[in-house]
């Protein structure tokens, strides 16, 4: 029996990286999946791969900035599968790396809308569905950037991800009495397409690896294991937490 056997879960940003690995791990551990991402082809292939392994999965293609996508994902979970127990709100973007004076309002709003406003849309629809099931686990992917470390050129990204932690803590306080737990997962550098786009030279990669106490990047599977912990009953007394899974980047810069 899996750690989340029989649970119904939404995973956003599921077409690659941490989201994809988490969706596969959740499926291995017995969950039924509603998969959300912009890239329909990749998403459909993942859903087919999960179904081939004997677990139910449905793809909902769309941009998480669109409130209708959040509503549709919850509707699929509740109407097709009967409820919602877990939501891993993981989709995000780093945006352009530039100084605040050089950042346009469009750059700012694109990152804020992708990383923070999308989480509001998601929670707005996910919370009532979880209440109808007697509770659940909401997980938001934040980051150590802006929480324990400031990186130049990442003002919008840091602000959006720090804002997620504030949103999460309010949800945890408001809905803890109703059986809903809310937590944020704060990964360190991870070997994903998004991470490789930032560390796009051997020198940049070596620099980022060296920032971590473990002197390496995480695999997506390692971050997925922590998401599984927060999704499962293993974390039944954990809520309102900004959980660092960062390889020690927050405690060493050398």
Image (spheres, grey):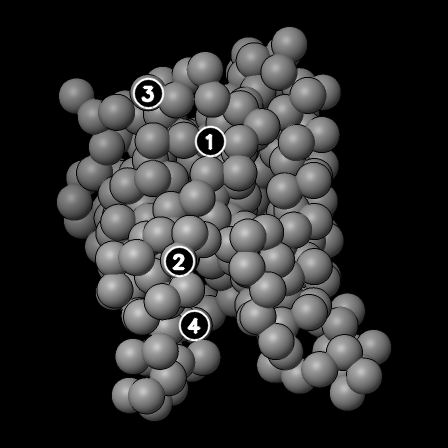
Mark 2 nearby-residue class (10 Å; few <14, some 14–19, many ≥20): few
Point out residue 75 in the picture as x, y percentages from the top left corner: 59, 37
Q: Earlier in the sequence, mark 3 or mark 4?
A: 4
Inspect this view and state whether residue 82 appears: no
Q: Mark 2: which secondary structure?
A: loop
Point out residue 220 in the picture as x, y percentages from the top left corner: 29, 57
Point out residue 107 in the picture as x, y percentages from the top left corner: 73, 78
Going 46% across and 38% down the picture, which residue do you hit?
A: 243
Q: Earlier in the sequence, mark 2 or mark 4?
A: 4
Q: CA distance from mark 3 to mark 1?
A: 14 Å
Q: CA distance from mark 3 to mark 4?
A: 29 Å
- Residue 234: give its label: 3
Mark 3 or mark 2, whichever is nearer to me: 2
| Residue that carries the numbered disc 4 in the rendered image | 194
Asked whether 209 or 185 is in front, the reply is 209
Q: CA distance from mark 2 to mark 4?
A: 23 Å
Side (left or right) of 140 relative to 107: left
Mark 1 nearby-residue class (10 Å; few <14, some 14–19, many ≥20): many
Q: Which quadrant: the N terminus?
A: top left
- Residue 252: give its label: 2
Whether residue 33 is situated above or below residue 35 in the rendered picture: above
Inspect this view and state whether residue 53 appears: yes
Side (left or right) of 159 relative to 235: right
| Residue that carries the numbered disc 1 in the rendered image | 86
């Amino acid at each position: 029996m899996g750690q989340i056997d029989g649970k119904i879960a939404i995973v956003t940003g599921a077409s690659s990286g941490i989201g994809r690995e988490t969706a596969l791990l959740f499926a291995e551990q017995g969950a039924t999946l509603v998969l959300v991402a912009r890239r329909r082809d990749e998403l459909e292939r993942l859903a087919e791969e999960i179904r081939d392994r004997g677990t139910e999965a449905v793809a909902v293609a769309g941009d998480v900035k669109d409130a209708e996508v959040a509503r549709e994902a919850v509707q699929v979970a509740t109407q097709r599968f009967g409820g919602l127990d877990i939501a891993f709100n993981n989709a995000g973007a780093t945006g352009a790396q530039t100084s605040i004076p050089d950042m346009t309002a469009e750059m700012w709003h694109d990152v804020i809308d992708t990383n923070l406003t999308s989480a509001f849309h998601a929670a707005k629809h996910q919370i009532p569905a979880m209440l109808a099931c007697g509770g659940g686990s909401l997980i938001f992917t934040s980051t150590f950037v802006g929480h324990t470390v400031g990186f130049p050129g990442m003002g919008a990204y840091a602000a959006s991800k720090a804002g997620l932690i504030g949103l999460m803590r309010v949800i945890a306080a408001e809905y803890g009495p109703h059986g809903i737990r809310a937590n944020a997962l704060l990964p360190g550098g991870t070997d994903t397409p998004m991470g490789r786009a930032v560390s796009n030279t051997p020198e940049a990669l070596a620099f980022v690896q060296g920032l971590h106490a473990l002197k390496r990047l995480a695999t997506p599977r390692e971050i997925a294991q922590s998401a599984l912990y927060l999704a499962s009953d293993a974390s039944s007394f954990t809520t309102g937490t900004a959980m660092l899974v960062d390889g020690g980047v927050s405690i060493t810069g050398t």
